[in-house]
Amino acid sequence: MNHTDPDRTERELTEALAALAGGVRAAPDAYRTARGEWLRRERRRRLVLAVLITVVFTLATLIGLWVLNEAPSDPGVIFSGLPSARLPDVQVSTR
């Protein structure tokens, strides 16, 4: 078994990461570029959502109007215009 000192492992990892991080150089306008790209994606996402909502609302309205247009124009059973049923004449006797 190979036993290593935890302090030694931590020190070596710290040195390796420091050397790696020291070699990274950010472009001068990296933040501005990344922010601009993010804003473009956000605007596009909002535009797509607005268009999708508009399309769904328009389709729902058109389908509703089409269904109403397809309904029969003659009165249905409820409003058939038949005379109301009359109760038979009942004679009431008074004593």
Image (spheres, rainbow, N blue to C red):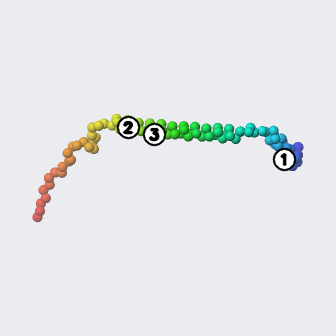
The residue type indicated by label 1 comes to Glu
81 left or right of 45 in image: left
Q: Contact (CB < 8 A) between labels 3 and 2? A: no
Q: Which residue is mark 1?
A: 10
The percent coordinates of residue 61 (x first, y second) are: 41, 39
The percent coordinates of residue 43 (x first, y second) are: 58, 39
Q: Nearer the viewer, mark 1 or mark 2?
A: 2
Q: Which residue is mark 3?
A: 57
The percent coordinates of residue 91 (x first, y second) are: 12, 56
Q: Please give the label number shown on residue 65.
A: 2
Question: Which residue appears at 64% of the width and 39% of the height?
Answer: 36
Residue 66: quadrant of the picture: top left
- The CA span between labels 1 and 3 is 60 Å
- The CA span between labels 3 and 2 is 12 Å
Please state which of residues 79 and 87 is positioned toward the viewer in this rendering: 79
Name the N-terminal-most of marks 3 and 2.
Answer: 3
Residue 13: quadrant of the picture: top right
Question: Which residue appears at 24% of the width and 42% of the height?
Answer: 80
